[in-house]
Image (spheres, rainbow, N blue to C red):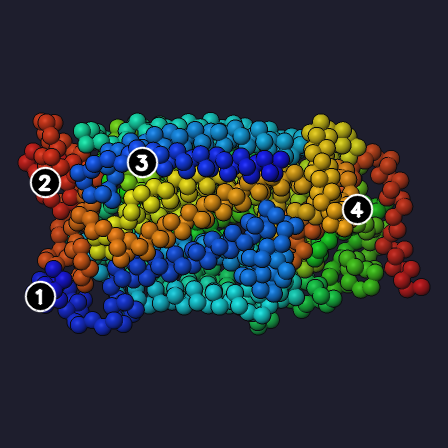
Amino acid sequence: MSAHAQVHGVEDHHDDHGHHHKETFITKYIFSQDHKMISKQYLITGLFMGVIGILMSLLFRLQLAWPDHKFTIFEIFLGKWGTDGVMDPSIYLALVTIHGTIMVFFVLTAGLSGTFSNLLIPLQIGARDMASGFLNMVSYWLFFLSSIVMLFSLFVEAGPASAGWTIYPPLSALPQAIPGSGAGMTLWLSSIAIFIASSLLGSLNYIVTVINLRTKGMSMTRLPLTIWAFFVTAIIGVVSFPVLFSAALMLIMDRSFGTSFFLSDIYIAGEVLHHQGGSPVLFEHLFWFLGHPEVYIVILPAMGIVSEVMATNSRKPIFGYRAMVASILAIAFLSTIVWGHHMFISGMNPFLGSVFTFTTLLIAIPSAVKAFNWITTLWKGNLQMNTAMLFSIAFVSTFITGGLTGIILGDSALDINVHDTYFVVAHFHLVMGISALYGLLAGVYHWFPKMFQGRMMSKKLGYIHFWVTSIGAYGIFFPMHFVGMAGLPRRYYSNTAFPYFDDLADINVVMTIFAIITIAVQVVFLYNFFHSIFYGKIGPKNPWNATTLEWTAEVKHIHGNWDGPIPHVYRWAYDYSKLNKDETDYVIPGQDFIPQNVPLQDNEDELDH
Amino acid sequence: MTAFLVVLVIILFGISVWQMSRIFQLAQGKTSIHSEIASDKDNNTNGYLMMGFLAFMYILAILSFWLWGDVLLPDSGSEHGSKIDNLMLISMIIIFLVGILTQWLLHYFAFIYRGNKTKRATFYADNDKLEFIWTIIPVIVLAGLIIYGLFTWTDIMNVDKDDDPLIVELYAQQFNWKARYGGNDNTLGEANVRLIEGVNQLGVDPADPNGQDDKIVTELHLPVGRKVLFKMRSQDVLHSAYMPHFRAQMNCVPGMITQFAFTPTVTTAEMRQNDKIVDKVARINEIRREKSVALTAAGDEALEPYEFDYILLCNKICGISHYNMQMKIIVESEEDYKTWLAEQPTVGEQLSNETK
């Protein structure tokens, strides 16, 4: 098939993607403009960053559980900051900062949205590639560069950025305030600026591709929910990331060029600084204008993946397709007007707090609709418990658990006492961290055969990975709510300075043990992933019996995705278990799904979804 | 206790792994489909495990409350705190009801509708009535919570000047707290970081007559039953004044003055008699005794026994010693408070002492 693809003529391909050119190793594997290869590059870079981010969390969980113990592992990984196995407080702050940054931006934004938007948008809408393969390639390489800069910052003399992933000035602006705000913070800001450029190029490409390159018959209301989610995610990204860029730029100016956007009335290290008139609260507004939509940039693609995987494996249409699309749009809109709920006690006018409480609790409504629709999708289904399906079900579970505690945090009056405690940490790890990771893992297990030319990941290893992870995730984050409600602030290197918190030691130990187990079992996943790339069993062309177009494309990767003409679309993406007019059998006898490229049959009713 | 918990977790984990591997072994059967695609046996096994997982979640929740229910904060020591606690309780009840119900539905459906070859899924694409129901129910519940929450919030944040609150400045710097009382006129003198010099560590304006009788202290004393209006300042980076026992928190922002007000209702002495606090202190001292044994064996000093005090913590990352930025708060009777305050020197005295 591939040989055929290499030589066959231009006449089949009316759009010129240069796929008939001879490829070298460099154009195929490194500076590739093919969306499938770029998606794999995103995934593997994302996984690599994920390993680093998660190992960092292992280090600080050890410190939190056994603050008095000396760990040789600290000396090995942290060098001068782990002398004699004792973790230095400044490196603790650096670890939580970089852990947050890596997980939010590099793993859950680029690794999740970058991977699956690139893989699925062209394949599911019936396009030969992205609107601009070149910009797509530039987008990946900017992401790669920003990853390198971020990793490089771990090795600077005074230590990496350590002002928290939210980098609130003045702490992030003044090297006198914390050593990490020197060269480490400069590199952090450069890395994020490059990352934003990468994200914008990617997002614009996704938007243009979805709008312009849908195949014949693929109306917006026939798009799979994955594409809706990626499309809306890209729009949120384009709207909000530039604001973070402006904040980063102003912070760079304050740090290096003497401006006072965020600084005023500061006396530090024995001297008064010249800065006058700025406001750190302004930075908080700018940061969270991106920061809050960012959590939806992280979670929406996961929602799209879960909707798709769940419908396919339930052998049922997703329940309430239009309501699902509407709730994605509602969440996207509301996500841009709720940022102030991170700032209830920042010193901004309490009236604003009231407004943001109102908008924040509104966002619970579309989220609830989605949760109920997923549950109803399972109802009376014929559930195929593939690993991807298990992660999708677990996604709904953690999304509900984490989402519900959002009702407390979104309520300004209640937020007063749990703000910046471990309650917040537990909340967002469940609702966006773990949930989005489950979405990522569901996507990897589900579309692995599409990424790696028909090879499949091991089912048994997948099950072990899933069950241990899902038990471990709750084991870490459920008890954490108690630590928060006991009043323990987050980002404390140790709570031994407060005898009042001495009785929290048990909970910390339990959480760390669960964390160790959960982190350990990810090795099973990594083994399964890399082993299956080379030795996975070749599965059928459409292993999960899905209706969407990507499974009609060639198993062997070729430029242009389809060997022949692009398929046309005649129906929505969720004709699972649809019966014929007499209700005697499925529309296609013996086959419980109708691919999107199959025309309307004589024996079926046309339904309006 | 720790050792017991560690062992318990390891045992439970071991059992779950053993059970899982057994179930997977039993599930080994002949499959007609591709070996990496879920077979009927897999569907069955994982369906049962879904119910097991539901049980795990419920047990985890119950066990957590049983083991750690008593680490939670005691009854509020401030007037508005009971309103917050009440709203918290209502929200928690709603959350738990919704959580228990939806998790049950999710996992029960995953179990009962686990697939097999002979089954046929029901083609059921939408139902406007259902969508309406589960839009409107959250709307009503959330409307109730929003209204209750907003009234509470407005109540807490709006300070009525007619209450004649005691004015206290909380001053944050890396890595300690100071408090400044308005003195006899209950008015704080103007201050700015540019005036920081020598003993005048808070930059109080020496030319402002209001500042002369101000008193700067490192331990916060509050009279019980009188509203206190805190004016927060920071001299370097963001800090957050967090007083968990009073359900009070506000950021300290360089360049601006933020505020938060509350009325302490329980004196330190009374809180020490609170049942939850008595138990907690006993538990903590038990832990400290155990630790001290190990410490003295290693030749270090033993830990001092703990006695409860209200605390002010820093709750916004502020630098290396963020984890140890604290101030003791003492709530006492009006007379005790006045006696204590009378002993503190005024800013005027401090400044004139320096010039001498």
Disc 1 from disc 4: Cα separation: 84 Å
Please tell me if label 2 and label 1 are on a single chain. yes
Disc 3 from disc 4: Cα separation: 65 Å
- Which residue corresponds to mark 4? B219
> From the viewer's perspective, is residue A566 above or below residue B139?
below
Provide the secondary structure element on which disc 4 rests.
loop
Between disc 1 and disc 3, the foreground one is 3
- Which residue corresponds to mark 1? A8
Provide the secondary structure element on which disc 3 rests.
helix
Q: Are marks 2 and 1 in contact (CB under 8 Å)?
A: no
Q: Amino acid at mark 3?
A: Gln
Q: Amino acid at mark 1?
A: His
The x and y percentages for residue A336 are: 43, 49
- Which residue corresponds to mark 3? B25
Provide the secondary structure element on which disc 2 rests.
loop
Res B19 → quadrant: top left
- In depth, the one of B29 and A34 nearer the eye is B29
Between disc 2 and disc 1, the foreground one is 1
Q: Chain of mark 2?
A: A
- In depth, the one of A5 and A375 nearer the eye is A5
Q: Amino acid at mark 2?
A: Leu
> Which residue is at the far left?
A602
- Which residue corresponds to mark 2? A600
Between disc 2 and disc 3, the foreground one is 3
